[in-house]
Amino acid sequence: NAGVTQTPKFQVLKTGQSMTLQCAQDMNHNSMYWYRQDPGMGLRLIYYSASEGTTDKGEVPNGYNVSRLNKREFSLRLESAAPSQTSVYFCASSEQEGFGYTFGSGTRLTVV
Amino acid sequence: AQRVTQPEKLLSVFKGAPVELKCNYSYSGSPELFWYVQYSRQRLQLLLRHISRESIKGFTADLNKGETSFHLKKPFAQEEDSAMYYCAPLDSGTYKYIFGTGTRLKVLA
């Protein structure tokens, strides 16, 4: 049972490049989330999907887009990467909103 | 605005000493409160939630509505408790967590 799987684990991008972070869960959870973790700022919610077919903005959505491809998969896209997007990105899922989260192992992204 | 504060970035204690990781929140209503932990080179994981009133790995957390606090406590720290700890109230209106900035606990031998 893999839980929440994120790919890639590490990535270096040049300013202006685009990329998609992948997230998949095998727990049949309804809700999925993308967070970024920056030193001294804790985890901040970028986007979330309360259930399959819905997505909503979180606290820091600018510069990102998401797709809830199906119940298992929730991807995060950076269309034109900026150095301010250098961060560690975590995907999480929960049975439904308000329940405890299961986190992925994170993606460390550096934009140069 | 709803906020959660973990005043200590780093807390160092000796093995066997009591530990208290502080968390204060400013929320309207009665939020559910959670503690998450991230051990070195591991993913973030749920440690405990206040409504379950359980003790996990010797840790407990009591909700003090008067002081709006949800401090995490353990009577005798172990070296394996060294980790990053996040307090995370759940906003009952949006059903989203607001994570604190975290406290790094170092338990010294």
Image (tube, rainbow, N blue to C red):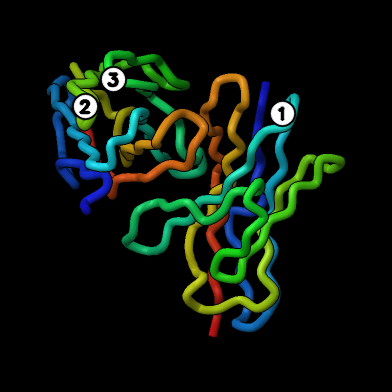
Q: How far apart are marks 1 and 2 (CA)?
A: 31 Å
Q: How far apart are marks 1 and 3 (CA)?
A: 29 Å
Q: Which of B22 and A94 is in front in this view?
A: A94
- The residue carrying mark 2 is A75
Mark earlier in primary sequence (2, 3): 3
Q: Nearer the viewer, residue B69 or A12?
A: B69
User: Where residue B24 appears, x then y in whole percent?
Assistant: 72, 43
User: Where residue A56 appears, x then y in whole percent?
Assistant: 38, 14
Callout 3: residue from which chain? A
Residue A107 appears in the picture as rendered: no
Residue shown at the point (33%, 39%) measured from the top left: A90
Q: What residue type is labelled 3?
A: Glu
Q: Quadrant of residue B20?
A: bottom right
Q: Are marks 1 and 3 on the same chain?
A: no
Q: What residue type is labelled 1?
A: Tyr
- The residue carrying mark 3 is A52
User: Where residue A70 appears, x then y in whole percent?
Assistant: 19, 23
Crowd rating for badge 3 (residues with CA inside 10 Å; few <14, some 14–19, many 20+): some
Q: Kindly state the secondary structure of the residue where label 1 is placed.
A: loop
Q: Kindly state the secondary structure of the residue where label 2 is placed.
A: strand
What label sits on residue B27 in the rendered view?
A: 1
Crowd rating for badge 2 (residues with CA inside 10 Å; few <14, some 14–19, many 20+): many
Residue A69 lies, with reference to residue B64, above or below; the image says above
| Quadrant housing the C terminus of chain A | top left
Callout 2: residue from which chain? A
Q: Which amino acid does label 2 sit on?
A: Ser
Residue shown at the point (66%, 41%) measured from the top left: B5
Residue shown at the point (51%, 78%) measured from the top left: B79
- Residue lying at the far front of the rendered structure: A28
Residue shown at the point (28%, 29%) measured from the top left: A83
- Judged by depth in the image, the label closer to the viewer, 1 or 3, is 3
Q: How far apart are marks 2 and 3 (CA)?
A: 13 Å
